[in-house]
């Protein structure tokens, strides 16, 4: 405790926040669209995005997961994801550029690649893989590679010799050329392209396609020398002698493997690659009779289909395994079968039969599959006696190739492997001879073209590094790319078959070598590309990098590990909503119109997916009947293990129903299906009543059985059981599931790492007495991770956690603070205005629409404008520096910035003014972005005019601005706490722990308040012991001065400077004390009401609250056979329309205790709604299990309590399940009477703080400032705010102390210069301003005129507008300034 | 159906927007790129409590066709 080493892992945003201007240009060009998490999947966002419009920080970020499987599977890492995404956008040229980043042969590879990318495509989990390869070809067909500009490359003088013009050689040449190296490619054959040209038939790869792509390479300055063979025409030594500084051997594997059977040497046996070469070179143009091909690879299929085209009568392929194992491209196999080629599976040749050394037939053997071999494929085993004969004059063995090593054997220093390939370093492709590199099939044996291309690209890197004398290996170690974290596949996704290219009609196919596959149509390609699941989210197309003029995008950022040394840790990690998919009877995953409450919340939002329009997802029709189903994932141990109540769902369902009605155009019907309505918070019941009575929201107490689709509509049938047990059905057109809250699994893991305990519901363990402390000292918790709760409670706890941490850290306060040097302010009084105008382009955000130059020039024509500038980004660091210099140089005394919103950027520019010695209030902004260019994008002319108008108005106003002074108010370093109950004492101790003296005023003669009556918390913790300890700590604390029997008599002053007079009573007579204090905390608590209802006070056996506990402890209940609890006595009734919040839990706890002690006693609880919110629900469950009988009553049929003739008690209540009156004759009745405040009204007057309608103190903001009063420096906590259990009081007390300390810690208070000021000469002392100000700022001076207390003035101008004498004006928004702007309209 | 007359006239609208809510909402409209006609000129006020009836009269005198006070 007090000293933690914290290791934080920060994920990169890939966009630098200090440079990002939030303009969104990056998102505009991002091709990846995905469901927006913020809009619960109903809206879309880009992979480059801002989580939501109001997000803080306001910069963009990039969602990047593990590398997309397609890209990862490509031997050459061609970024398939990126080009597919760009195709979907119609950005073909950009797609082409992405491909060319690693692959100079898009059209070629797009035709012939066996596409490992498609094998791993996750779309196969939905339907079929994306046609990635065909999409690549599509792009190459759209964009003429020769049309792309040749980049400007600085030439280097070193020359490189490349042996072989196949894919490896040409790719190396391409990338070396891009590095500036001139290379010469030596090709033994008469055509360039290697296997691409000679090994692939024209019907698959038209030579024109390849030639074009080769021309694109030679454009870069690469020379190809044909008919020049290694060994025959050139040698390695000779090349070095000629001046080549490096040699790349890429000679391929053109030597066919032998079948190893008799007759193989006969005429009529032509190996596959030799056959294809002859065909491709035109040396073989006609064959006759049958042809038999042996093998199952691409060469075999190519040979077969070529043979057919050359005139063979019958073409048969022998393959020794089955179709499944066939290594050839599937498209090719299907093409061959379509063309009538016969494939004999599980057949191998055993002998070639010859006559006069000419082939006549082949003898074959049938095979069967045995055990798997080393390749994992099942080994073919010959079937004895299965020989058969196939007559054929042409046999083409195509069972594999190897490099022809004959020209290599004599090269000095070159080593070969035992597989007859060149030995190289695996990483660098360097051979043993310095300066000689090798790659492609010559190194790895025959492999796919994309593999050779990858090798060529790697070789280019190695050769470049070699020539520059750099380390060849640095940064090239293969890294393990994780393949786990992908964008999830959407649950609701349409299945469709993959796009297939049209192929040439059969008649035209076999007639010649015309290309068979015709490519995808544009419509096909776009639709296919749109099916991509965007596994990686960001596809790394880098369009954003190019689009960002602020150069804020950096894709190279990595996860960071940050080490922090801290004294305390606060956990506020929040919650997730329950996933309702496993409520099968609600069909959430299947039915579009069943949505979660969070999704509905987004639907209602103006910034949501439908701009706040109420539309149902299935057909975007406005719903007419909406149902809410409560307790989905809460109070349920059948579908999930969430026995607890999520606390917030009832209220948000009521709110959603009311707001939905407001958003709907015509009479929306809303129904909430619920078990108990738990609107227990402050003002919640009032809202519930209004929703029902004024708005007509229908509340249906029921149990929902199932949701089913209504046939032929998108409507939904809800089957439910009503309170009387009747099964009913009703049709709705939208159903909202009020999903509960839960702790996400990753937080469970985090808790283990942090060593803190969770409770069985997986919320962070804490005690009622230390609600923000975890099980590990020094680590604190707040919010829904501590337990289900709403925003006010979470905010109170957050402040409470800060107080708890602050208590530990108090000695270190201010030690890390750095003081800013202030520049002395120049006196501009009496100077004529010299205005500087700075017009911002905001990249293209303003300048793309508004004619910035015209606005700038216009500005220079305006009066008093001394200097005009325009900046790319006025907010950038260098522009700020420039502005500072310009202000000084041109002696400017007013500044106008025409840019974005003053709400976000005014402080920045004000700081620059201050740094230049100018008063910061001499600035005005013209909002020509948010209010102009962004909203009038389709009318640049009008937008420019508007920019000029806004600028003119700003210039006019700024000329009238005057320097304003900020007032400093000293803060008295002490606090006053009113109320010595638990809340008051806890607040006092936290203040004292942090070193601030406290005056604690208590009306009673001892500390403790109502906690003195409490025995146990609902969790069973001993309150007596806690309270004794708490009182002792207060008594012992030298900084806390306690005044008992005391009350406040008078309060003077304001924030930081209060002076209170305390009246001290007691047996020795009345005394008075006056204390000065900077802040005050009101913790005066509450009390239970006394009533005469239900014979209370008239019958000795009718009790209230703790009286039952007293009777129990006195043993008075031993003889009792039955006891009745009556809930909501005086609560939730017209005269007190609020819930007293703690009574249900209290009564149930008592009932359990009674049942445990007296199992035979009949215990009845008569209730309206059971409100055991949060984890208190566990008590309700235990009570029912223990046999406590719960009977619901309604407000219009309250229980009747009477005495019978013998003086006994009789209760009559209508049972809603049985629908008839029930008569109970209890021995005792106990009433949970309402809780109300005490003494609030007088304090309200003393501190000028308002009360709500129910006489509880009114906080400054129900959700965001729940412990502050509207009057500065006054805070509240405990039951004076609203009835609440002990742990909530304590958390709120800690919160109040924390908020009070934020003031005390500052020692002085800096007040804005934009405040009201009174001209006494005009003031008639009417007092309207004093009456009207909600902050109590105006008062009367000694001379009787109105006077504004600057410390309290919020600068709203209410007093200014209401002053009938015109005596008050608002600095910075003076009448003359606003009139001047109006004049310039 | 009534014939729609082609009108060249464009209204001039002045908006007095509270800094804390409506002015921020107008900013948000920009962030969300919601498009609206460019006929409006915004004057930022610290609170609509600052509004003086004379501002409205001045704006009308200046030729405003409509005034929108929002806060």
Image (cartoon, coloured by chain):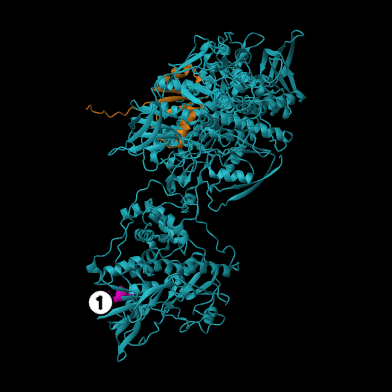
Chain colours: A cyan, B orange
Pointer 1: what residue? A314
- Graded by Cα atoms within 10 Å as few (under 14), some (14 to 19) or many (20 or more), the crowding at tag 1 reads some
Q: Residue at x 55, y 45 (%)?
A: A746
- The x, y position of residue A966, in whole percent, is 64, 25
- The x, y position of residue A83, in whole percent, is 41, 56
Quadrant hosting residue A379? bottom left
Give the extent of the magenta segment.
Answer: A303-316
Secondary structure of the residue carrying tag 1 is strand
- The x, y position of residue A1047, in whole percent, is 68, 13
Please state which of residues A123 and A307 is positioned toward the viewer in this rendering.
A123
Q: Residue furthest bottom?
A: A356
Q: How many marks?
A: 1
Tell me the quarter of the image containing the C terminus of chain A: top left
Is A10 rendered above or below residue A721?
Answer: below
Tell me the quarter of the image containing the N terminus of chain A: top right
Please state which of residues A749 and A493 is positioned toward the viewer in this rendering.
A749
Is A847 rendered above or below residue A972?
Answer: below
- The x, y position of residue A735, in whole percent, is 38, 34
Please state which of residues A1139 and A554 is positioned toward the viewer in this rendering.
A1139
Please state which of residues A493 and A346 is positioned toward the viewer in this rendering.
A346
Q: Residue at x 28, y 71 (%)?
A: A513
Whether residue A1218 is visible: yes
Residue A372 left/right relative to A836: left
Residue A730 magenta-highlighted: no
Image mark 1: chain: A
Whether residue B64 is visible: no
Quadrant hosting residue A799? top right
Residue A1123 left/right relative to A968: left
């Amino acid at each position: 405790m007090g000293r933690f080493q914290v290791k934080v892992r920060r994920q990169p945003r890939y966009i630098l926040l200090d440079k990002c201007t939030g303009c969104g240009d990056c998102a505009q060009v991002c091709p990846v669209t995905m469901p927006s998490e913020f809009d619960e999947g109903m809206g879309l966002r880009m992979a480059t995005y801002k989580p939501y419009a109001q997000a803080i920080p306001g910069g963009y970020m990039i969602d990047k997961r593990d590398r997309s499987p397609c890209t990862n599977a490509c031997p050459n890492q061609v970024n398939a994801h990126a080009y597919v995404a760009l195709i979907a956008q119609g950005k073909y040229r950009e797609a082409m550029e992405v491909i060319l980043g690693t692959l100079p042969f898009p059209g070629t590879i797009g035709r012939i690649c066996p596409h490992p990318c498609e094998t791993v495509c996750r779309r196969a989990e939905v339907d079929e893989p994306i046609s990635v390869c065909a999409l690549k070809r599509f792009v190459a067909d759209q964009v003429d590679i020769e049309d792309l500009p040749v980049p400007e490359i600085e030439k280097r003088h070193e020359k490189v010799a490349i042996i072989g013009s196949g894919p490896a050689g040409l790719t190396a040449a391409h990338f070396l050329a891009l590095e500036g190296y001139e290379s010469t490619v030596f090709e033994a054959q008469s055509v360039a392209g290697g296997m691409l040209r000679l090994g692939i038939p024209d019907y698959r790869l038209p030579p024109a396609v390849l030639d074009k792509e080769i021309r694109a390479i030679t454009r870069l300055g690469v020379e190809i020398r044909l008919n020049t063979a290694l060994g025959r025409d050139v040698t390695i030594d000779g090349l070095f002698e000629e001046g080549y500084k490096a040699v790349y051997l890429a000679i391929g594997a053109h030597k066919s493997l032998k079948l190893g059977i008799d007759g193989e040497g006969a005429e009529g046996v032509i190996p596959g690659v030799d056959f294809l070469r002859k065909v491709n070179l035109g040396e073989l143009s006609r064959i006759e009779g049958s042809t038999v091909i042996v093998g199952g690879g691409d060469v075999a299929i190519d040979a077969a289909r070529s043979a057919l085209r050359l005139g063979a009568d019958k073409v048969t392929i022998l393959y020794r395994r089955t179709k499944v194992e066939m290594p050839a491209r599937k498209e090719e196999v299907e093409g061959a079968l379509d063309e009538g080629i016969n494939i004999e599976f599980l057949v191998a040749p055993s002998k070639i039969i010859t006559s006069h050394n000419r082939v006549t037939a082949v003898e074959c053997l049938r095979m069967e599959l045995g055990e798997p071999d080393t390749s994992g494929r099942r080994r073919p085993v010959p079937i004895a006696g299965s020989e058969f004969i196939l007559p054929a004059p042409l046999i083409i063995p195509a069972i594999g190739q190897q490099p022809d090593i004959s020209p290599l054997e004599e090269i000095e220093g070159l080593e070969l492997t035992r597989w007859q390939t060149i030995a190289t370093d695996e990483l660098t492709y360097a051979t043993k001879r310095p300066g000689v590199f090798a790659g492609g099939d010559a190194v790895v044996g025959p492999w796919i073209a994309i593999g050779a291309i990858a090798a060529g690209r790697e070789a280019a890197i190695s050769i470049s590094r070699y020539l520059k004398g750099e380390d060849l290996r640095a940064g090239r170690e293969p890294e393990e790319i994780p393949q786990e974290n992908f964008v999830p596949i959407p649950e609701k996704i349409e299945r469709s078959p993959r796009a297939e290219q049209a192929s040439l009609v059969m008649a035209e196919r076999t007639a010649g070598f015309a290309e068979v596959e015709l490519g995808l149509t544009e419509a096909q390609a776009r639709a296919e590309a749109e099916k991509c699941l965007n596994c990686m989210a960001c596809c790394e197309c880098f369009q954003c990098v190019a689009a960002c003029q602020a150069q804020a995008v950096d894709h190279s950022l990595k996860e960071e590990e940050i080490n922090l040394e801290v004294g305390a840790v606060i956990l506020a990690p929040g919650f997730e909503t329950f996933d309702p998919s496993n409520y099968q009877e609600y069909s959430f995953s299947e039915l579009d119109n069943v949505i979660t409450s969070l999704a509905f919340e987004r639907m209602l939002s103006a910034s949501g997916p439908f701009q706040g329009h109420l539309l149902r997802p299935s057909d975007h029709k406005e719903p007419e009947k909406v149902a809410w189903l409560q307790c989905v994932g809460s109070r349920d141990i059948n579908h999930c293990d969430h026995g607890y109540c999520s606390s917030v769902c009832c209220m948000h369902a009521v709110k959603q129903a009311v707001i939905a009605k407001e958003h709907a155009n015509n009479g929306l019907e809303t129904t909430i299906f619920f078990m108990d309505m738990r609107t227990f918070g402050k003002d919640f019941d009032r809202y519930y009543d209004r929703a029902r009575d004024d708005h007509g929201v229908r509340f249906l107490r029921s149990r929902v059985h199932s949701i089913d689709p209504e046939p032929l509509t998108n409507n939904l049938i809800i089957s439910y059981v009503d309170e009387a047990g009747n099964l009913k059905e009703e049709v709705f057109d939208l159903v909202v599931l009020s999903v509960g809250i839960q702790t996400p699994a990753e937080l469970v893991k985090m808790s283990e790492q942090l060593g803190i305990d969770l409770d069985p519901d997986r919320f962070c363990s804490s005690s009622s007495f230390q609600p923000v402390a975890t099980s590990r000292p020094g680590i604190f918790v707040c919010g829904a991770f501590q337990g289900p709760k709403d925003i006010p409670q979470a905010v109170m706890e957050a402040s409470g956690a800060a107080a708890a941490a602050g208590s530990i850290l108090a000695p270190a306060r201010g030690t890390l603070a750095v003081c800013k040097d202030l520049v002395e302010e120049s006196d501009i009084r009496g100077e004529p205005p010299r205005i500087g105008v700075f017009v911002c382009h905001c990249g293209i955000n303003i300048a793309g629409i508004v004619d910035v130059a015209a606005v700038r020039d216009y500005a220079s024509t305006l009066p008093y404008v001394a200097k005009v500038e325009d900046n790319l980004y006025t907010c950038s660091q260098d522009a700020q520096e420039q502005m500072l210099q310009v202000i000084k140089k041109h002696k400017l005394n007013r500044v106008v910035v025409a840019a974005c919103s003053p709400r976000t950027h005014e402080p920045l520019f004000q700081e620059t003014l201050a740094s230049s010695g100018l008063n910061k209030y001499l600035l005005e902004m013209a909002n020509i972005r948010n209010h102009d260019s962004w909203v009038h994008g389709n009318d640049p002319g009008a937008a420019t005019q508007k920019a000029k108008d806004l600028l003119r108005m700003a210039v006019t106003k700024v000329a009238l601005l005057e320097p304003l002074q900020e007032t400093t108010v000293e803060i008295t370093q002490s606090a006053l706490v009113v109320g010595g109950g638990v809340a008051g004492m806890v607040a006092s101790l936290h203040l004292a722990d942090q070193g601030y003296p406290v005056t604690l005023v208590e009306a009673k003669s001892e500390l403790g308040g109502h906690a003195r009556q409490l025995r146990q918390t609902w969790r069973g913790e001993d309150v007596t012991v806690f309270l004794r300890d708490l009182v002792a700590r207060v008594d012992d604390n030298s900084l806390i001065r306690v005044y008992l029997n005391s009350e406040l008599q008078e309060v003077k002053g304001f924030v930081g400077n209060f002076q209170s007079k305390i009246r001290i009573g007691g047996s020795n007579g009345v005394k008075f004390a006056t204390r000065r204090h900077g802040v005050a905390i009101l913790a005066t608590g509450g009390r239970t009401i006394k009533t005469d209802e239900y014979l209370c006070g008239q019958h000795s056996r009718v009790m209230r609250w703790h009286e039952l506990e007293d009777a129990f402890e006195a043993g008075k209940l031993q003889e009792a056979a039955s006891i009745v609890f009556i809930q909501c006595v005086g609560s939730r009734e017209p005269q007190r329309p609020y819930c007293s919040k703690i009574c249900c839990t209290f009564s149930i706890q008592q009932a359990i205790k009674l049942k445990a002690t007296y199992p035979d006693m009949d215990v009845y609880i008569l209730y309206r709604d059971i409100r055991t919110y949060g984890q208190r629900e566990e008590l309700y469950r235990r009570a029912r299990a223990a046999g406590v009988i719960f009977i619901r009553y309604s407000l219009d049929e309250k229980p009747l309590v009477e005495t019978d003739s013998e003086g006994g008690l009789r209760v009559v209540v209508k049972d809603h399940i049985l629908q008839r009156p029930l008569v109970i004759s209890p021995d005792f009745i106990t009433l949970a009477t309402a809780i109300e405040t005490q003494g609030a009204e007088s304090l309200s007057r003393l501190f000028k703080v308002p009360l709500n309608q129910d006489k509880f103190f009114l906080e400054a903001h129900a959700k965001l400032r729940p412990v502050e009063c509207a009057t500065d420096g006054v805070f509240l906590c405990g039951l004076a705010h609203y009835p609440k259990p002990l742990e909530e009081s304590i958390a709120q007390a800690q919160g109040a102390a924390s908020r009070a300390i934020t003031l005390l810690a500052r020692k002085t208070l800096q007040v804005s210069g934009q405040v009201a000021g009174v001209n006494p000469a005009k003031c008639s002392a009417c007092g309207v301003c004093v009456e009207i100000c909600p902050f109590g700022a105006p008062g009367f001076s000694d001379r009787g005129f109105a006077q504004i207390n600057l410390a309290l003035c919020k600068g709203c101008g209410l007093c200014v507008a209401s002053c009938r004498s015109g005596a008050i004006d608002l600095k910075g928004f003076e009448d003359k300034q606003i009139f001047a702007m109006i004049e310039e309209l | 159906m009534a014939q729609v007359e082609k009108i060249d006239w464009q209204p001039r609208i002045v908006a007095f927007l509270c800094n804390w809510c409506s002015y921020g909402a107008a900013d948000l409209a920009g962030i969300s790129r919601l498009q609206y006609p460019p006929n409006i000129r915004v004057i930022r006020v610290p609170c609509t409590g600052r509004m003086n009836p004379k501002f409205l009269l001045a704006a009308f005198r200046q030729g405003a066709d409509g005034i929108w006070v929002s806060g």
